[in-house]
Image (tube, helix red, strand yellow):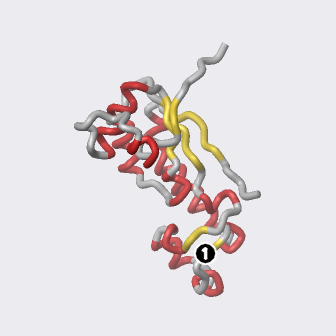
């Protein structure tokens, strides 16, 4: 039998912040994550949908949570057929885009050459590798458009 874990979609969701659930001294993302992780065994990280995470950020998530804590991640929107604002792409990726794609406000995965597409996937995987290495990786959700 598997274990059922319960959590919410994020520890900084405005609804959760406005609910009064956090104690007054949990006034930063760091202290909120630590408090959240003391009450729930799982969280869904939605920020990874909006932009590629930094590996250092993932290391901090690992360090700030108990050993048995689990992170689920929403896949970067570029991977799921959503329009991706140019500003959401790392500068190095923007610079490697074909000229026709650099002129747009948003791009799709199909706009990237295969090698660049593979590199963005590798960047995502490397960024989350500290979570995986710590045994705290749950699922990666791929949310596709209608």
Q: Of all residues shown, which one is farthest toward the top?
A: 1
Q: How many marks?
A: 1
Q: Position of residue 105 (x, y in %)?
A: 58, 79
> In this view of the protein, which residue sits in the foreground, 50 or 21?
21
Instruction: Give the image location of residue 99, x and y in percent.
Output: 61, 86
Q: Does residue 146 sit above or below 69 in this rendering? A: below
Could you tell me residue 48's position as x and y percent? 51, 52
Residue in the foreground of this view, choosing between 135 and 34:
34
Please state, as top left, top right, bottom left or bottom right, where the N terminus lies in the image: top right
Q: Quadrant of the C terminus?
A: bottom right
Locate residue 24, reporting x and y percent: 25, 37
- Residue at image location 56% in from the left, 34% down from the top: 138
- Residue at x 57% of width, y 61% of height: 120
Element class at badge 1: strand
Q: In this view, which residue lies farthest toward the right? A: 146
Residue 114's quadrant in the figure? bottom right
* Quadrant hosting residue 110: bottom right
Crowd band around label 1 with a 10 angstrom C-alpha radius: few (<14), some (14–19), many (20+): some
Taking the spot 58% from the left edge, 48% from the top edge, the residue there is 74
Q: Is residue 5 left or right of residue 131?
A: right
Quadrant in which residue 116 is drawn: bottom right
Q: Is residue 36 above or below residue 125?
A: above
User: As displayed, is residue 4 above or below residue 117?
Assistant: above
Q: Which residue appears farthest toward the left when viewing the image?
A: 25
Q: Which residue is mark 1?
A: 106
- Is 13 situated left or right of 65 in this image? right
- Name the residue nearer the viewer: 135 or 140: 140
Seen at 62% across and 62% down, the residue is 78
């Amino acid at each position: 039998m598997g274990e059922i874990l319960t959590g919410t979609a994020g520890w900084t969701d405005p609804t959760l912040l406005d609910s009064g659930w956090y104690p007054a001294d949990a006034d930063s993302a760091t202290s909120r994550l630590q408090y959240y992780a003391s009450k729930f065994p799982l969280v869904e990280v939605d920020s990874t949908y909006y932009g590629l995470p930094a590996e250092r950020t993932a290391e901090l998530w690992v360090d700030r949570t108990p050993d048995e804590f689990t992170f689920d991640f929403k896949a970067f929107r570029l991977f799921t057929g959503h329009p991706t604002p140019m500003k959401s792409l790392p500068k190095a990726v923007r610079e490697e885009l074909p000229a026709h794609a650099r002129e747009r406000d948003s791009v799709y995965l199909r706009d990237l050459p295969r090698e660049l597409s593979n590199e963005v996937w590798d960047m995502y995987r490397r960024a989350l590798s500290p979570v995986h290495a710590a045994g705290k990786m749950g699922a990666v959700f791929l949310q596709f458009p209608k």
